[in-house]
Image (cartoon, helix red, strand yellow):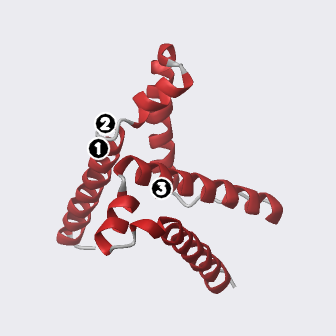
Amino acid sequence: MTSVNVLLTIVIGLGGGLMVGCGFVAFLTVLGILPRLMQLTKTMKYIQGYEWAIISGTIVGVWFSLNLVYFPLFPTLIALVGLAHGIFVGMLAAALTEVLNVFPILAKRIGIDDQLAILLMAIVLGKIVGSLFHWMYFTS
């Protein structure tokens, strides 16, 4: 590997890390996720716990993404972990959509504001079909 390739890899890695870091900080600060979570759960006195959870979760997540880690798990447990991940991502997407009022604005712009439930069901069913297709096609 030449020094140009190493330098290019370093620059691309740092650039990608900065982009993801900026997005993560924007997610936490601009949308006010943590203050809202602490307000809803009435846990303002545990702010240092939240900070350490974010820092340690980020470090562990980065470590796992940079290293090939293999956990031998039973298929049933893998299905439960996958279900938990799917629920988390779905709830997060729904919360962000609610905060940003994306669907009402979209429905109003395309002229179907009286059929918002149909739009939401189409999106949900599309996600389900897409996920099933992905899992059936790419894992077989």
Percent across and percent down for residue 91 are 55, 52
On screen, 2 above or below 42?
Answer: below
- Between 76 and 16, the one nearer to me in the picture: 76
CB atoms of marks 3 and 2 within 8 Å: no
Say which amino acid is labelled 1: Ala
Mark 1 Cα-neighbour bin, 10 Å: few <14, some 14–19, many ≥20: few
Q: Which mark is residue 125?
A: none
Task: Residue 28: give x, y in percent of width and height.
Answer: 36, 39
> What amino acid type is highlighted by mark number 3?
Ala
Quarter placement of the N terminus: bottom left
Q: Residue under circle 3?
A: 93
Residue depicted at 20% across the width and 60% down the height: 11
The label number, if any, that marks residue 26 in the structure image: 1
Whole-number angstrom distance, CA of label 3 to CA of label 2: 17 Å
**Residue pictured at 47% horizontal, 24% vertical:** 39
The image quadrant that residue 112 belongs to is: bottom left
Mark 2 and 1 residues: CB-CB less than 8 Å, in contact? Answer: yes
Residue farthest toward the left in the current orientation of the protein: 4
Viewed as shown, does residue 66 lie left or right of 85? Answer: left
Q: Amino acid at mark 2?
A: Thr
Q: Nearer the viewer, mark 3 or mark 2?
A: 3
Residue 74: image location, x then y, percent? 82, 61
**Which residue does the numbered mark 2 point to in the structure image?**
29
Tell me the SS state at disc 2.
helix
Task: Look at the image and tell me in which quarter the C terminus lies.
Answer: bottom right
